[in-house]
Amino acid sequence: MKASDVMTSRVITVGPDTAVRHIAGLLFEHRISALPVLEKGKMVGIVSEGDLLHRHEIGTDRSARSWWLQMLSADRSIHDYVKSHATRARDIMTRDVVAVTPDTPLAEIATLLEKRGIKRVPVLEGDRLAGIVSRSNLVQALAAKGRLMNTGDSGDGAIRARLSAELERQSWWPTMSNVIVTDGVVHYFGMVDSEDQRQPARIAAENVPGVRRVEDHRIISTVLAWSV
């Protein structure tokens, strides 16, 4: 399996001038841990929960350090102040973003997430953001497949591509839903706003040639705890 087989393609993004408080609201509202920053369609950075940990508004900034420690780490003090007081994405975002391509094998992505200690990695197709692969996506693939492996020429990729294209056109398709196809079985993961959203998703899958069965593992968003 590769990135394009499991990635979340409908990605919530922000711009360089998006307010920090708005970013915090998006992270909480959509139960996600990071937001890519796009400028003129090109990814220029990413803002994660970690970038919002030390904020002066909630008293978690590092301004209480002793004067002598501040003297020894003046450069760090500048960085800390910007992180804790900046009001726009461009000033707090991580610019050196690790990314993969749609063809990157899941084994490489898993190793990358582990070595870098990160929770997700953007999927870039040239300069265009094609999706996000998170730790959760890998767990979803494991749940759907039983174990991570090369699926070979099973047609699952074609089924997922056709179904995803259909779903992305629909206003009822939730942002926090993902599709994984294994051996002709469509698995839906993530969350839905209501039970009503399950039926059209099932019907969409049943209209794709090659689909043998549909399993909807999504839960209602009102009972979902804030997760990675």
Image (cartoon, rainbow, N blue to C red):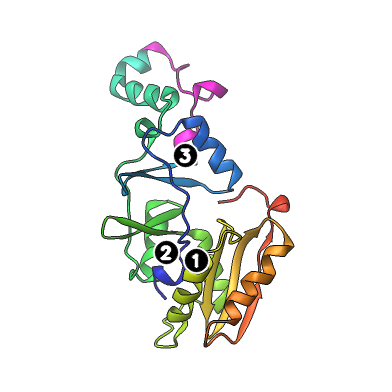
Evaluate if marks 2 and 1 touch, with contact meaning CB atoms under 8 Å apart: yes
Residue 12 locus on image (x, y percent): 48, 49
Outermost residue to the left: 126
Quadrant where the N terminus lies?
Answer: bottom left
Q: What's the distance in space between the residues labelled 3 and 1, CA to CA?
A: 21 Å
| SS class, disc 3 | helix
**What's drawn in magenta, residue-wise?**
51-67
In the rendered view, does 139 fall on the left or right side of 101? Answer: right
Amino acid type of the residue tagged 1 in the rendering: Leu
Compared with 114, 182 (above or below) is below
Residue 7 locus on image (x, y percent): 45, 64
In the rendered view, does 228 fall on the left or right side of 112? Answer: right
Compared with 155, 51 (above or below) is above
What residue is rendered at 39% in x and 39% in y? 15
Which numbered disc covers residue 50? Answer: 3
Q: Residues within 10 Å of mark 1 (few under 14, many from 20)?
A: some
Q: Which residue is mark 2?
A: 110
In the rendered view, does 79 fall on the left or right side of 139? Answer: left
What residue is rendered at 63% in x and 79% in y? 214
| SS class, disc 1 | helix
Q: Nearer the viewer, mark 2 or mark 1?
A: 1
Amino acid type of the residue tagged 3 in the rendering: Gly
Q: As rendered, which of 31 and 58 lies closer to the eye?
A: 31
Compared with 66, 115 (above or below) is below
Outermost residue to the top: 67
- Membership of 52 in magenta stretch: yes
Which numbered disc covers residue 138? Answer: 1
